[in-house]
Amino acid sequence: MPPAAPPKPLARRILGHALRLGVAAAGIAYIVKTVRWTGGVAADGSPEPGFLDLLRDADPGLLLLGLALAALSIPVSSYRWWGLLRAAAVPMPFLRTLRLTYVGNFFNYCIPVGSTGGDVVKAYYAGRGHDRGTGGKTAVWLSVFVDRCSGLFGLLVLATLVGVTQLGDETIRPVVLTVGVVVLAGALAIAGYGWGPTFRGLRLARLDRLRGVGGVFRAARVYREQGMRPVVRAIALTLAVHGLLTVSAACAGLALGLGEHVSLGRLLVVLPLCIAAAAVPLTYQGLGVMEALAISTLAAGDSADNGIVGMLLFLRGYQLTSGFVGAVLLLAFPMEKPGS
């Protein structure tokens, strides 16, 4: 067994926490500065509702529809991870995978440890009962990592696919083209890793012998030997997962009257990018980061800022709901080793 990695120096840990707290504080300050809490008068003399007015007058039907769509995304997300586990020959019932997904969401959304904390918890509990020497634990951790990466890449694919229908929008066109280039590069990388001639030509087999991470690449061989089909399926399922989540957020935006300021098509392009930005563990649930990206990219004017902030607030509320379900499952049914 390789020696455990030495702990990070105290100064580095303190610096990392200070950096994250600073970014979070900046995000909160940005939101507070952007939001107009009370109503006013627009430049054309028409009344302009404040943030609290928008929340009070929101369409409850659309908000509930958004919550239902977000809830539907959880089983599909679990099925995506379950498929990666099965492809890696890791036995696990689907219901246990679903339960671990909810528990992971609790740590992702309800505890400010970063958006990757739930992934660590999922991998830890899923790996219990598997012998490290057989590679079972490595395969579990790799499946979680691939699940996370396929989710992020799928968000970019979703934004590109919707963006193709919005190329006539001059505001959003540069964003779509930029993301499309990233998607093309990622697709070529996946195809190259899975295609035998490219794998041999670039001598990628040497990665299996790298010290420290060679075991990861050896575990990844199971996906490559299947022509990367499990990864492609995971990305395809991501379109369903984040399609539901994107539409749920759009429902919240429409419930707040955001449709008066920005087209639905533009919303459906920008929202996947905001969700991807929130997955970067800089602030709690991307606080401030999502708002800044959405406001700058949607370019809908100051009158839309309240609706954008409110939409993202409800999106976080939907995600928190799934986290609370995970908390109930964790408290009511303590996690045990498979078969114990």
Image: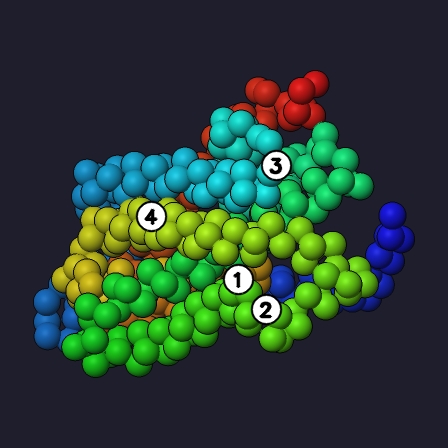
Mark carried by residue 199: 2
- The image shows residue 105, relative to residue 35, as above or below, that is above
Colouring rule applied to residues? rainbow
Which residue, given by chain and number where applicable, does mark 4 sit on?
A: 240
The reply, left or right, for residue 329 in relation to residue 246 is right
Q: Nearer the viewer, mark 1 or mark 4?
A: 1
Asked if the residue at tag 2 contacts the one at tag 1, i.e. Cβ–Cβ closer than 8 Å, the answer is yes
- Residue 26 can be seen in this image: no
Q: Secondary structure at mark 2?
A: helix
CA gap between label 3 and label 2 equals 25 Å
- Nearer-N-terminus badge (3/2): 3
* Residue type beneath disc 1: Gly
Q: Secondary structure at mark 3?
A: loop
Which residue carries the number 1 mark?
194
Residue 340 seen in the figure: yes
Q: Earlier in the sequence, mark 1 or mark 4?
A: 1
Element type where label 4 sits in the image: helix
Q: What residue is rendered at 38% in x and 48% in y?
A: 237
